Amino acid sequence: MTVRILDAGPLTTVQDLGRPGHLRYGIPPSGPLDRESFRLANRLVGNADGAAALECTYMGPRFQVDRPCAIAVTGAAAPVTVNGVEAPRWTTLVLRAGDTVRVGAPRAGVLSYVAFSGGLDVPLVLGSRSTYARGRLGGLEGRALRPGDVLRVPDGPPPVVRALAPPPPVGGEAETRVRVVLGPQADRFTDEGLRTLLGSAYEMTRESDRMGARLHGPRIAHARGHDIVSDGIALGSIQVPGDGQPIVLLVDRQSTGGYTKVATVCSFDIGRLGQVKPGRKVVFTAVSVAEAHRLLRESDALLDGLLREETA
Amino acid sequence: MRFLPAGDLAVSVEFGEEISVEVNTRVRALEFLIREKGPAGVLEMVPTFRSLLVYYDPRQVGYDALCAAVAELVPQASTAVLPPARTVELPCCYDSELGLDLEAAALRLELPVAELVRLHSGAEYLVYFIGFTPGLPYMTGMPERIRLPRLETPRTQVPAQSVGIGGSQCCIYSVDSPGGYWILGKTPLRLYDPEAPDPILLRPGDRVSFRPIDRAEYERIAAQVEARTWRPVIA
């Protein structure tokens, strides 16, 4: 069957769980910013977690399907309508041929995910269907969707209606707390600078994208200069250039860079960070590597629990 | 050598804070050894001038166990373990239209343009690592005589495939991007081609040389690259 894009929204891309293994050539992993919401969307339509689906930033798309199929919308608190009638998120929606779906602007959160039973069929590029728009790689012709695009979906399993109740909260908190591990260059900052990072609230700005979240707040003081001999940039690296403002590097990040990195946001909090609207605040809490690994196992178990619940 | 945590999924193995062939060789040798020996839980690695970023799966291996497994390989990480380097010849058109700063750089260096081209194309360059944008090589090997500080005001847009110099480094832009190097010329080859089965031309450790070509040859090769009939000279 096919999905015809009527309106695309400002940034709607095809993603799967990403393209690991190519950072040594400067190619980022891409994939969804909020992996948890993405995986749950796929589960709700009976797909494997890594099937290709849509990631929508801010306003989602309006699209029409030409055959019966099942979809699910997760992530940000965005209104969903089918043929103009409001429909629930975090639930399998069974569509008939000719139905038109619209994902609106989120009341809370930023990123919505739309999964289709069977998964979106775009070519595998370096082992992945994820779009890396800056590098014109993967997804649909290496770019964000446009009105008039048509996406193919192979026939999926017959739809089984599943729902997550209550759905996990996404976005909307006055302050979003994210856990960080200090380093790799924490020693290039003054004690005062580290206290500023951990004791202040930073505002998400409009310049943020899939490459990096640019935050604004009290200046983080360097001990000796903000330039280093370039080294690798991990997922969640908090780069602090000369202006003292933090940039958290994300899934479409550059692989290496020459600015000091004060700390690294833990992988399990990247999705929450990605869901923070411009103007909302982020606070950083430091944890040790061992503590981070314990929290990662907890986060895995929580997601597994949600996944089991909906399949039961 | 020190291990610096980079969040819950990566650790940076740092050999030093300077740019040198010696330090970078140890980094690339360690990457090679880890790939060969395959310690549990390593997912991928990013070599740079002076450190190796190791991505791992903490569900498979703990931080301390991973660091211990890597530390065991460090003493062997030297040139001796690396396979022979590839040599790659890049045709390069040094003319003042494609080489946006060719004349200004020659003037600043107090050299005739032809001498600047002779010196730049006469050297062999080592790819320290690939990074920043897809396929962009960080290279060393610049003759002392043509070293210049980077442009005071970086350009907001440098065309992909432009060949530039700055400080001790030579750079080839892989995609259109901002940049502060003095642009001496342009290669008709694509360092990053998202539509090719293997989108990246150069590899860490490659030895690169530039073959001066005129504008007519540039256009001829560019047409073959476009038609996907050009085979780069790699040995």
Image (cartoon, coloured by chain):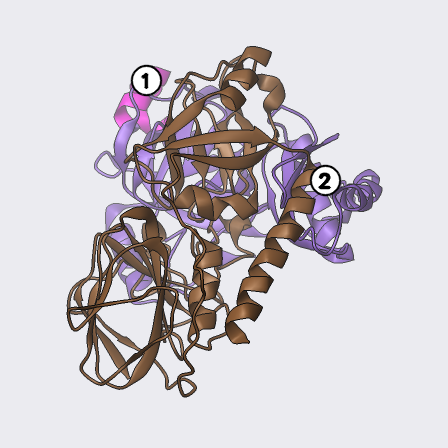
Q: Quadrant of the C terminus of chain A?
A: bottom right
Kindly identify which chain the residue marked by label 1 belongs to: B
Marks 1 and 2 sit apart, C-alpha to C-alpha, by 45 Å
Tag shown at residue A213: none
Tag shown at residue A290: 2
For chain B, the rendered hue is: purple
Q: Secondary structure at mark 2?
A: helix
Q: Which residues are magenta?
A: B103-116
Residue at left 42%, top 48%?
A252
Q: Quadrant of the N terminus of chain A?
A: bottom left
Q: Secondary structure at mark 1?
A: loop
Q: Does residue B197 appear anywhere in the picture? A: no
At label 2, the amino acid type is Ala
Which label sits in the foreground, 1 or 2?
2
Kindly identify which chain the residue marked by label 2 belongs to: A
* Residue A238 image point, x, y percent: 50, 32
Q: Does residue A165 appear anywhere in the picture? A: yes
Residue at left 37%, top 57%?
B193
At label 1, the amino acid type is Glu
